[in-house]
Structures are given as structure tokens and as C-alpha cells.
Amino acid sequence: MAKDSYTEFANTGFGRRITKALGLPQPAKLRRYSPGDPVIEGPVVLVGQSEASDLIAGRLLDWDLDVRRHVGPKEKVAAVVAVFDSAHSPANLSESVLELGGLLKQLKPSARVITVFRNPDHTEDPAARAARKGIEGLTRSLAHEMRAGGTANGLILHENLDPAAPSVAGALRFLLSGRSAFVSGQFITVDSVNGTLPEDWSAPLRNQVAVVTGAARGIGAAIARTLHRDGAQVIAVDIPAAGEQLTQVANQVSGTALQVDITEQDAAERILAHAEQHYGRLDIVVHNAGITRDKLLANMDAGRWDSVIAVNIESQLRMNQVFLDSELFSRTESTVGPRIVSLASTSGIAGNRGQTNYAASKAGVIGMVSAASAQLAARHGTINAVAPGFIETEMTAKMPMATREVARRLNSLSQGGRPEDVAETIAYLVSPAAAGTSGLTMRVCGQNLVGA
Amino acid sequence: MAETVREAVIIGGNRIPFARAHGAYAKASNQDMLTSALNGLVARYGLQGQQLGAVSGGAVLKHSKNFNLVRESVLGTPLDPKTPAYDVQMACATGTEAIGSLANKIKLGQIDSGIGGGVDSISDAPIVVTDELRGILMEANRAKTLGARLKALAQIRPGHLAPQAPGTGEPRTGLSMGEHMAITAHQWGITREEQDELAAASHRNLSATYEQGFFDDLVTPFKGISKDNNMRGDSTVEKLAKLSPVFGKDLGEEATMTAANSTPLTDGASAVLLGSEEWADAHDLPKLANFVDYEQGAVDFVDGAEGLLMAPTYAAARMLTRNNLSFEDFEYFEIHEAFASTVLAQMKAWESAEFCRDKLGLDAPLGSIDRSKLNVTGSSLATGHPFAATGGRIVATLAKLLHGKPGKLGFISVCAAGGQGITAIIEGR
């Protein structure tokens, strides 16, 4: 991981004055989650009066948060949850939006703004859909305006969803907490009442068995550590040649190492056999393994194109089918079924010069999860994708210094994310408290300017 | 006291790739390599924090500072530090002896689980000073005054300073192991062609086995090496025929042993996890095979009555008689390829009615071994042979080969310096 000297400098007293005077980016030290941390410290202000708003208030009070309808003009605010449940037309957004705006100057560092609204696609009424899409637009723009490590995200509820659904609480808690440090300008959709809230929020994955591919290094190793921290038993998978590092990761997380090339035809069968032998179950699959073989399309050869497609998407399609056909993974007895998360990329959303192969594979992942969500829903399961933006890894440390420095600042938080930030979002998506969210591609990019 | 003897189950194994000496692992110590092999095993089977019955292993070439090599290695792993460990040494039979003795403890109910293995490094071998210099240094150490100390040290002469690297020569004959083997090979009429064929087959089999992914759960990379780097998958009898003999040169035209049909000096480490059936089940671990029995042997090679590396022929005869088995009962044979001629000479001896009658005391010869069942995944000529690590490599490989074939038997033969050897039987499940 390359050192981000600029962020360190900008967080010194002198650095803060200089960067401010020169109008330079001011990357803040982000509030990140450690076990035992409170969800969020300070007043959480609820904007908007509705039944949903009351239910959400009750939920936040259950967590002993300092929930307010109003705050004094000098009081610091930790978060604002703006519930637009009853927005029928763009004209009636005004009151709540301006109330929200009035609170922004009182926000603490690493504050959170969460807008809550019904899915725009679920209404045929032009005015209602316009209002709902309008909230999306304002949330994205507000995310750009947030300062000092603050983020703004949206929570989109299915038209008929009871706001008391466990996954609404799960999403709110994720967005309020330090787990979502590098997530901004994003929308979490909740479509079903599936899911359960954990008895112990510090171990939401207790008794769950997870397989993580590409676990030997970087983001994969962080995913293994984070899932383990959240209580899961981890099967760490990587190619045999990466076995030495894989051993270290598996031993760190008290898991098991499985050396297998995921492009082998029997890779999924070998993973299932390992899970069956050692744990007798498999709940979570994280498809993290991926490769890049960059080349302009004009210079692309079959080796580069085919290997990227084979590793980054074909292997996942093949393995998912085997997993879903297996009794071990496809249990349907509870309201929390099998969960899959795939690594996409902002390249797959916005495209990237020299990455036609990589972008094709990663856009393919996004297509795969949206199509496969129905298949998973039949088993009370979920499938989602996570698209990391600029993350500080061994891979990005090899970028030319100037390119890296620019890439870091090109997002609303003016800094690169950490592998742990990606891992936190994945840990949330595979938790029983997110079982109502599926088919989604969530970006962990600090609201990268590329590929909005 | 419990009367019943229970099964000792081979659960799995791990080794680091074997590397030719003075190469990839030149900077790694025995402890580094054994620790790495153990860490890989712990990771594969999720043994972090577990207290095992014992860890047993050793190294043939060992620094005096490594008096507690295995225990020190265990302390460098995530195993519970309350896991006892002890060093074993029986030359190239070290690994098999370590595993066999653990199996016996499990069978007797003394322990429920254990790891057996071994490690060797030629690259990190202890260099010893001459006996003369050591005598002078000890005298200086004992001296009570500065004058006496200087007087002692003044005896040092340039010739004393030449370091002595460990050799594979037999202390009692002064002959290297290769020269001993050349004598035996000549006595048994082992031809150059059959040695080269065996060597080429070893490389071919090992390479094909890697291609199948068979070693994915037996080998963990180390220092950037992910496969045995002595392996030459494109090895052919024609290529090997071009090499000049390196042992038995005094035989002139009849010398047959080359660098290719003899094992190279190698660095590496291996470890095998064993347990009782109950322990394996309680920890959700696989049961690949049973460790059935093993036997040590030794011959009188000093005055030439028997070949240095022929002890396994005697051990095998006793072991098979005791278990009421013949070669026809075995599915696979793992005969350690110290030299191609070692394997061939042992097999010829077992085919010889005369040898089996006069030397082994058998009514009939043990018979021939079906070549299609011999060293089917390659052996030491291809993998290399880090002395004490070879036993663990063979036991784990054979156990995996036999897994899914309940009741099928595998035979192991490993020769060792000092005219010793070891044989073992394992049974698939």
C-alpha cells in the first residue's frame, strides 16, 4: 500500500491552513468501524413526518441513539435521516429539503445524511416518480457537497415494503456506522422483508461459513479478515501459486486454506467438498478473485481477452450454477438463504482506457447479479456486486506516482479507500440483516467522479 | 489398560516444494522450512490454537543450535504452544520413522493426534571446523590466564582453518553413498538403460501429476517456488543417455550411474497429520488412509556382506510375513529413488529365489512388482530428496492416492545411510 502523504499533511494544523488557503482538496480522516464502537456518536436528526419516519425513529431509539426532531442552532449533529416517504410531487419536497439544508452547517466530521424514499420505478404516476427521482438527484449532489469525511446516501424502499423490515434497519445501521466510511452518493434498495437482525451486532455473521476467492492478498485478504471479525468461519481460496500468502491469511483468521484455480472446471465442486468436510455448511460466497491484462483494444490478443473473461466472469457464472444446484449452499429452510457477492469495478460502470477486457468482465458481473437475483430469491438468498473505486492496494501502489495522486483525489472524499472499506460493504451485504437487498451493485468509491 | 489397538488415520499432508540445493532456499534455515510446512498444514486443516498429542520430526544435517528443531518450529506456528514436540533422526528414514512412531502412539491410545515430518537443507548445512582447531579452541577456552590462552591460540596453523562441510560419505567405509550404490548396482547387473528409463518415468509422472492439480492440497509454495524445481517434465531416455557416469567410474565402461539417475542434493520440508478416527471425526477432518504397520531394517554393509542401501529388502520380508501379505495384495508401491539403481536392485532382490531363500529366509521369492503401480506420481529422482523430508512426501502422496479406495494397500520402502532402511504399509479408506 502506497503512503498517502498528502492526506497526512492535510490533517496537520499547518496542512489544514495551507490546503484551505490554496483551495486544495481537504481529505479528512474517515471514521472507520472497530468492534465495540457505537453506531454513531451525537444527535441523529429525523426530517419528515410519516409512519415510516416514526418506525425508523423507534428503531434508532432501540439502539440508544440520541434521536431528535429538532436541534438547537449551535448543536453539532452526527447524522440526518430525511424520510421522503410521502413525496407525491416535486413541489412537496421543499419543506423537508430546506430543513435538511439548514442542518448541514451543524454537521460533525464524518457525518451522515441518509435519504429514505420509495422506489421511483414502482410508481406509474409521473409526478410521484419525478419526486422520487428528484430525491436521487439531490442525494447525489449533496454527497458532492459534504465535507470533513461526511457522506450522503439513499435508502430506496420497495413500494409495498413495511418500513419495519429487518433489512431497512440493517441498511440504516450500515450507513450510519463507520462501516460505510468510503461509501457516498450510493443507493441501497430494500425489496423484501427477508432477513433477521443479529442478537449481537458485533458478530452479525456468527455461525456462518463463508468462502472468499482471491483471499491471499489485498482486498481478498481484507474481506477474509472482516468476515472473520464479524463472526464467520472463512474458507480462504486462491490459486496454488499464491499458497504461501494464503496460508498466512487463513491462519490469521483461524480459517482453512484451499488452493484451487477457480477457472478449473471442478473448482466449485472442490470448494463444496471442502466446506462439507470441514464445516458441514456453506452460507456465503464472495467472488473476489480477478485479474487485469490491460491493452488497448487495437492491440488486444486472445490471451489477454480470454484470460480476463475466464477468471473475472465465466468462472463465477459456472461456480454459481454448481453452488445453487447443491444442497449444501441452497438450503431454503430459513428466511436467510445463500448469499453471493461479486467484485465489480467502477471500470465496469464508466469504462476505462486500456481495459476493454476488464470492463467487459466487470460490467458482466453487474449484469450477472441483476439477472441472478431472481434465482437466489427463490431460495431466500441474495446476490449483489460491489464496485470498488480507487483503493490503496499493492496493485494501485504500482501506478505511476502522479496518476495515483490524481486518482486518489477524484472523489468526494479526496482520498483513496482502503481494502477494509470494500470488505465492510461486503460483510454488510452478506449479513442476515441485508437479506432484503439483492441484485444491487454498490460502489465503494467515495463517490468517484468517474462513472457516476 | 485398554487391550484393543485402534486405527491410526492419515488425515493429510503438506510440504513445501523441494528445491535444488544452493538455489531458491539458500537463505532458508531448517527451522524456516519446517515452520512453513507446518503452517501450511495448520492452514489447510484449520488447526489454529489446537493442542496436538505430539509433533515429531527431524533433520539429517542439523546445527547444534537446532537441538530442539521441531519444538522451536512448532512454537513458530499457530498451534497451541502446549503441543509437545521431539526430534527424531534415522538418516533418510527420519520422516517415515517419525510418522510411524506417532501412528503407534495413536494406535495404543497414548495420543489422539500428531504431526510427523522432516526437513533438510544442504544450503544451510552446518560447517564444522577441523578436529585440530576445535581442540585448540577448547584448550584456549579452558585456559585460566591470558598467557595460557594466547599460548593455546598460537598453535593455530593455516591448515586448521579449512572448514569441513558435511558429506554423504559413510564414516566406516569412506565411500560415498553413490559409490556404495554403484557396487550394489554392478553386483545385481542393473543396466544404464533401465536406470534412465526409471528416471525419465519419474519426471514424466511427477509432471503429469502436477498438471492434474493432484498436489494442490499437498504442496504449499515457499519463497516464490510453487513446484519442485528439479522436475524436468520433458525428460526422455534419449536425453538422459547422453550424460556421463558420476559414480562407479572405476568400473570403466560398465559404470552406469549419472547425475540424472541419482537424486540431486535438495532442500525441503514435509509434514503429515495423523489422528485417531474419533479425533478426525470430532474435528471434521478427512480420513485418507490408515497407517497399518512399519518395519526398520539394517544390514552389515561395512565388510561388503550386503549392499549399503539393501536394508529395506529385509525389512519388507519381515513386515509382509507378519501381516500375511504378498506383493500381489498392493495397489501402489512407493520405493524411494535414492538412485534409480536402488529401486531396481531392491526389486531384483525380491524377484531372486536365491536371495529371498538365503538372505531373507523365505520359501519363495516375494516376486516382481508391477511397474504400472510403482511411483506413479513420480519419486525422488524428479522431486529431489531433502533427506528427512522424503518420508512425509511419500506417506502423504500415497495416502491421497489410496483415498476413496477402501481396503486397497500401499507399500513404502525407504533406504537410509548406515545400511539402514524402513518399510511401511498404508491402507486406503
Image (cartoon, coloured by chain):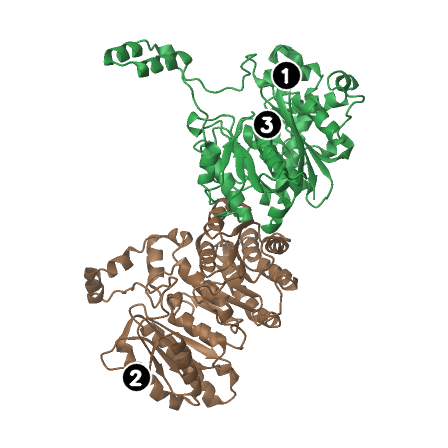
The crowding category of the residue bearing disc 1, from other C-alpha atoms within 10 Å (few below 14, some 14 to 19, many at least 20), is many
Distance from disc 3 to disc 2, alpha carbons, whole Å, reads 80 Å
The residue indicated by pointer 2 is A70
Q: Are marks 3 and 2 in contact (CB under 8 Å)?
A: no
Kindly identify the residue that appears in the image at 55 percent across and 55 percent down: A311
**Residue sitting nearer the eye, A357 or B87:** B87
Amino acid identity at mark 2: His
Q: Tell me whether the residue at label 3 lies in contact with that at label 1, contact meaning CB atoms closer than 8 angstroms.
A: no
Would you name the residue on which mark 1 appears? B182
Label 2 marks which chain's residue? A
C-alpha separation, residue under disc 2 versus residue under disc 1: 95 Å
Q: Where is residue A39 in the image (x, y as percent from the top left)?
A: 37, 70
At label 3, the amino acid type is Ala
Mark 1 lies on a secondary structure that is: helix
Residue A409, x across and y down, in percent: 33, 63
Apparent side of residue A98 relative to residue A285 in the rendered image (left or right): left
Q: Name the residue under label 3.
A: B93
